[in-house]
Amino acid sequence: MTDNSLQLTAQTLAEQVFESLQEAIVLGEFLPGEKIRESELAKRFNTSRGPLRDALRRLEARRLVTNTPNSGARVVELSTQQLIELYQVREALEGMTCRLAASHMLDDEIQELSDLLDKHQQEIKQKDGAEYLRQEGDLDFHFRIAQGSKNELLRTALCEDHYQLMRLYRYKFSNRKGRPNKALSEHRMILEAIKERDGELAELLMRRHIRNARKSFEKFINERENQFK
Amino acid sequence: MTDNSLQLTAQTLAEQVFESLQEAIVLGEFLPGEKIRESELAKRFNTSRGPLRDALRRLEARRLVTNTPNSGARVVELSTQQLIELYQVREALEGMTCRLAASHMLDDEIQELSDLLDKHQQEIKQKDGAEYLRQEGDLDFHFRIAQGSKNELLRTALCEDHYQLMRLYRYKFSNRKGRPNKALSEHRMILEAIKERDGELAELLMRRHIRNARKSFEKFINERENQFK
DNA sequence: TTTTTACAAATTGTCAACAATAATTGATAT
DNA sequence: ATATCAATTATTGTTGACAATTTGTAAAAA
């Protein structure tokens, strides 16, 4: 993912607070379900409650925060079921994204995507690329495809809305055991389909890729449940 | 769509304003691209700028309003390209929705869906059901399927986010010439696939249905453009 | 001991005034 | 006439105070 920290585009205090608070939430500084007290946070960000409430509305739009009238805001807390639903939505959106990318991605973009996968292979081999970094790189693959689709609505939905949620729950989305290598080979096949400009195949492969990730996640959940029986 | 006007669930002033303003925008009381002046509207809704700004943020989340810092809010104005993008997103989301509905829709819900299509057939025959009503009914079909998917994330995305945008641009989404009858027969085929619990087919048919609507729209646009050459 | 009620404290919702920014107007120069 | 700049006006951004609501606490009742 391209650097989004040096966006000097925070025109207003509310936007600044939004960005900072979002980052804090996603990095786990607040626990899922934790209460967000307006005055407390306003003080932390050196602002008043107005801009802070504004920021909360924006975070609500991205589903990072849930609000209950007169009661207050909390950091979102996704159930297993909701995480599965998120996978299903991603399968649909990224499938379409990939189909469009096969048609609209520029040759340069395809080459960069190919380079990225080579880099990933190195990281997996060297075993150094810590899990965290590897995952961010994994997401990078998906975002470049969203970028390549030239559908701004899809790009926004995935890169700006879903992205943060996935980061927040990355420990749950993390690949187990042999997944990294398998995921990489799935990525390579998707890339090939895009190179061939075969949108139908590209969509099919991307959907299978996400479905596999979902199944891996469901298996993990089930195993953990059975552990206590 | 089931009646959403008698939601007495507007706990706060900001929510009330949000609902009222959304309805006003969708019903065309404000033109696309029109400037929204905070104080002016605050007066209209008998409130102060605080709750009104809150409402604007919510409308922004649903893409009914665009905001430019320090400059102000405007009613959204979708280009032809953006409308096409919207169709593409719908194709992906509703396709998945339909696949899930084939698995999870209750028998009762399927029966009601069947009844709805019979009603639509009557309305088309009698030529009385004004275009506006017919279209709302058309959307109703899609929402019931979203409801039937039992995926709350998908249902919200479609019924709450996309729904209002489609209503706002309904005159552009409206079916030309023979589309109503064709659309109805497409709906019937989708229903059959759901009855058979054939998720794969249901998805395929729904995607084709939305693709057809998009093509009809694109054709209309092209014809209108060539008219001026 | 548990439940209920009344009160107190904390928190969110709303408002109106003030500050900062953008849009407008009109004068001046080219 | 057109473009440029400065001053004015209008509009948005921000703040702190107040109102309404919820939450927490402790006494009273079961």
Image (cartoon, coloured by chain):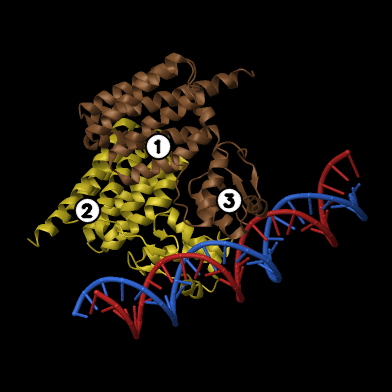
Chain colours: A yellow, B brown, C blue, D red
Residue type, label 1: Thr
Q: Is B191 on the left-hand or right-hand side of D21?
A: left
Q: Tell me the crowding category of disc 1: few under 14, some 14 to 19, or many 20 or more residues within 10 angstroms, Cα based.
A: few
Q: Which image quarter: residue B195?
A: top left
* Residue A202 visible in rendering: no
Tag count: 3
**Which residue in the protein does label 1 denote?**
B2
**Which residue in the protein does label 3 denote?**
B67
Residue type, label 3: Asn
Q: At numbered mark 2, what does the secondary structure look like: helix, strand or loop?
A: helix
Which subunit holds the residue at mark 1?
B
Which subunit holds the residue at mark 3?
B
Residue at (66, 53) in percent of width and height: B43
Choose mark 1 or mark 2, whichever is in front: 1
Which subunit holds the residue at mark 2?
A
Above or below, B171 against A23 in this view is: above
Residue at (14, 59) in percent of width and height: A224
**Which part of the image, by quadrant, shows the C terminus of chain A?**
bottom left
Residue at (17, 55) in percent of width and height: A221
Residue A4 rendering spot, x and y as whole percentages? 46, 58
User: Looking at the picture, do discs 1 and 3 lie on one chain?
Assistant: yes
**Which residue in the protein does label 2 denote?**
A180
**Which part of the image, by quadrant, shows the N terminus of chain A?**
bottom left
Choose mark 1 or mark 3, whichever is in front: 1
